[in-house]
Amino acid sequence: MMKLPRKNRLRASALGALAVSGALLLTACGSDNNTGTTGGGGGNNTSAKNVKCDGAKGKLLAAGSSAQKNAMDLWVKNYMAACGGVEINYKSSSSGEGITSFTQGVVGFAGSDSALKPEEVADSKKVCTSGQGVNLPMVGGPIAIGYNLPEVKDLVVDAPTLAKIFDDKIKKWNDPALKKLNPSAALPDKAIQTVHRSGDSGTTQNLGKYLGKAAPNDWKYEAEKAWPAKGGQGANGSAGVAAQVKQVEGSIGYFELSYATSQSIPTAKLNTGAAAPVAANSENASKAIAAAKIKGTGKDLALGLDYATKAEGAYPIVLVTYEIVCDAGNKPETLGNVKSFLGYTASDEGQKILSENGYAPIPAEINTKVREVIAGLK
């Protein structure tokens, strides 16, 4: 038997593993399991009514960000109900794994909570034979700071305090800094147990961007996908972090709001310097995302977010999940599916699902450009 070059063997192995995972889990209902595959997730939304299937058929593999998993569950469920000849398999893992799968040519599109780096764009050109990977903002939302402290129902934190907590500089819940922010709360003399993502994560990177911009004197780490600080406990995916916070009294962690909502985990308000502390909710995240500017060029729509905003009612710990696609050079067998499915997710109907499920829709002005790029994919 002819032995394939190592690069091809790795690509074939990744494709086989993803295909097997998708086949095994295609019919499973959606859950918070970050290693699962979306194939018709849960949710009580009605099926989509205005989907343009446009002859889409066959299977479409995708992978990446767990931040958008709950939205993707609903999108896939609704889309597959409308377009019966298509099977969408979204493997929820991490932004880093999604980008790797994309640049190896394993998936039709990837989800990432951070825009492609220059070296990743260069890698994408090997797959996008006549183009390159571009970032299409599709899902917005707050990164909630969830905590397990039965004594306190309305916790307030600010960026410097949060930085010190996650950097293991503030170790007790009754620390003077927390007392100052919560003068009427019965803060216990209890150890703080921090929980963070164990693998490469766009959620981690976005939290790092916020702490670096809003508390530069207390958070000295670069905003990378790998957790940078010492101490704390790592957990797999947003679902894993949420599960640990839910189970361990005295713990605190970070994850997308939908995970806090689904597990009834209380979330902290942020003292941003505005008139009142700001809660983590879709409306307040939308106020922060609405101020974003497109920093990408051409068909790339990567956004620049203001993590240090003090605007009234704006919740600044936000992320935007991008669907990463080839602007040109897509595989003919998946191009129709990619355009049809992402056309639905970017539609008014698809975006409405976000605000109903703990996410924030992409601002209309930006989303109009997203739709234009999707329509022009080739």
Image (cartoon, rainbow, N blue to C red):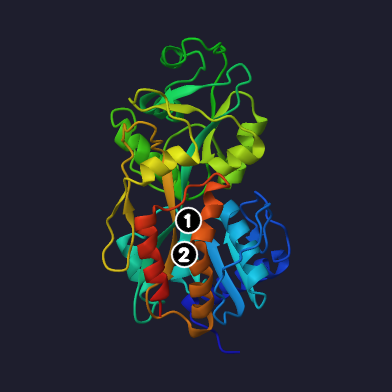
Q: Is residue 208 above or below residue 79?
A: above
Q: Is residue 122 above or below residue 179?
A: below
Regarding mark 1 in the picture, which secondary structure is present there?
helix
Is residue 235 visible in the rendered image? The answer is: no
Q: Amino acid at mark 1?
A: Ser
Q: Residues within 10 Å of mark 2 (few under 14, many from 20)?
A: some
Q: CA distance from mark 1 to mark 2?
A: 9 Å
Quadrant containing the C terminus in the rendered view: bottom left
Residue 240 lies, in percent from the top left, at 61, 43
Is residue 271 visible in the rendered image? The answer is: yes
Residue 344 or 41: which is nearer the viewer?
A: 344
Q: Is residue 30 left or right of residue 232?
A: right
Q: Is residue 239 left or right of residue 101?
A: right
Residue 97 lies, in percent from the top left, at 50, 59
Q: Amino acid at mark 2?
A: Thr
Residue at the image position 43 percent from the left and 37 percent from the top: 284
Extreme residue in the bottom direction: 1
Quadrant containing the N terminus in the rendered view: bottom right
Residue 316 or 190: which is nearer the viewer?
A: 316
Regarding mark 2 in the picture, which secondary structure is present there?
helix
Q: Is residue 50 left or right of residue 164?
A: right
Residue 211 lies, in percent from the top left, at 36, 35
- Tell me the mark number nearer the camera, choosing from 1 and 2: 1
**Pointer 1: what residue?**
95
Residue 226 or 295: which is nearer the viewer?
A: 295
Residue at the image position 54 percent from the left and 40 percent from the top: 257
Mark 1 / mark 2, whichever is N-terminal: 1
**Pointer 2: what residue?**
100
Residue at the image position 54 percent from the left and 74 percent from the top: 52
Residue at the image position 45 percent from the left and 17 percent from the top: 178
